Image (spheres, grey):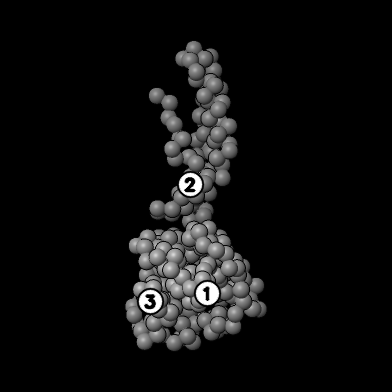
């Protein structure tokens, strides 16, 4: 029986539960066409057994390369120390609207992000793991003391009901912070399918006082009814975390 990879080959495993389109898909499609022509009949297969063996070897090489690329992507944060900052907390609820408290939402996203990063081999520093207040300077000091490689602060936005979309901030003079913010913004917009409000600079305390590349993400607007409903979904924290981890992998 001929072994078909049609179901699985178009995608490569980036990490548990997360797939991306295989960059070698065009090559696989060409190989599949050649194989299809070679095995139309048993007689044709026998006549071309040497060519068939070569094609099978080529397929194995392509599959092996795919897994290598997947491992490289997953390993891009392996060994890195990454600080994840869930905004607000405790006596500071952040924005509250449409049945959502920002401090609770971003803590869930941060927890999922921690799990995904640790699965990929990173060491994760959490500025808070519960509903407690942590000062802005203390958040940066914690990341600095642990020599974090990158710092990501997670927030949800609030404005007029019509405002919507995702935006990511970096400190004005940090080129590496801008690169990190750009990678995070791209993945968040693509994964959450939100309006791209762009990458912006800001003099936020956690961006100004961190010694490593840092970015602050605004996942969406809880004051927007449509985005709030999306954020209430049980799947949202994991989706947002997946995008953040992808952004970190792209940056590193």
- Element type where label 1 sits in the image: strand
Residue behind mark 1: 216
Q: Residues within 10 Å of mark 2 (few under 14, many from 20)?
A: many
Q: Quadrant of the N terminus?
A: top left
- Residue 153 place in picture, x, y as percent: 48, 75
Among numbered discs 3 and 2, the one appearing first in the sequence? 2
Q: Residue at x 55, y 63 (%)?
A: 195
- Element type where label 2 sits in the image: strand
| Rendered image quadrant of residue 3 | top left
Among numbered discs 1 and 3, the one appearing first in the sequence? 3
Q: How far apart are the two marked residues, 1 and 3, measured between alpha carbons?
A: 18 Å
Q: Residues within 10 Å of mark 1 (few under 14, many from 20)?
A: many
- Residue 14 place in picture, x, y as percent: 47, 52
Q: How far apart are the two marked residues, 2 and 1, measured between alpha carbons?
A: 29 Å
Residue behind mark 2: 12
Q: Quadrant of the C terminus?
A: bottom right
- Element type where label 3 sits in the image: strand
Foreground tag (1 vs 3): 3
Q: Residue at x 51, y 55 (%)?
A: 73
- Residue 55 place in picture, x, y as percent: 54, 28
**Image-based side of 111 in relation to 150, left or right:** left
Residue 125 visible in the shown view:
no
Among numbered discs 2 and 1, the one appearing first in the sequence? 2
Q: Is residue 186 above or below residue 206?
A: above
Q: Is residue 84 above or below residue 52?
A: below
Labelled disc at residue 101: 3
Residue 188 visible in the shown view:
yes
* Number of marks: 3
Q: Residue at x 56, y 31 (%)?
A: 31
Q: Residue at x 37, y 70 (%)?
A: 108
């Amino acid at each position: 029986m001929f072994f078909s990879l049609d179901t699985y080959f178009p995608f490569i495993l980036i990490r548990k539960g997360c797939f991306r389109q295989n960059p070698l898909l065009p090559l696989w499609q060409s190989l599949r066409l050649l194989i299809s022509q070679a095995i139309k009949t048993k007689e044709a297969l026998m006549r071309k057994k040497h060519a068939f063996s070569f094609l099978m070897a080529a397929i194995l090489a392509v599959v092996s390369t795919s897994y290598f690329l997947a491992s490289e992507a997953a390993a891009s944060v392996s060994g890195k120390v990454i600080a994840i900052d869930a905004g607000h907390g405790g006596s500071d609820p952040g924005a509250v609207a449409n049945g959502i408290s920002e401090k609770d939402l971003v803590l869930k996203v941060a927890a999922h992000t921690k799990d995904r990063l640790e699965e990929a081999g990173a060491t994760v520093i959490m500025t808070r793991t519960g509903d407690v207040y942590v000062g802005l300077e203390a958040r940066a000091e914690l990341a600095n003391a642990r020599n974090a490689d990158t710092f990501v602060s997670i927030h949800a936005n609030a404005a007029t009901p019509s405002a919507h979309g995702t935006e990511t901030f970096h400190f004005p003079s940090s080129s590496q912070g801008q690169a990190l913010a750009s990678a995070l913004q791209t993945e968040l917009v693509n994964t959450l399918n939100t309006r791209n409000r762009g990458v912006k600079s800001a003099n936020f305390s956690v961006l100004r006082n961190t010694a490593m590349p840092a970015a602050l993400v605004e996942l969406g607007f809880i004051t927007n009814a449509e985005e709030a409903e999306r954020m209430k979904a049980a799947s949202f924290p994991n989706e947002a975390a997946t995008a953040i981890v992808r952004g970190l992998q792209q940056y590193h």
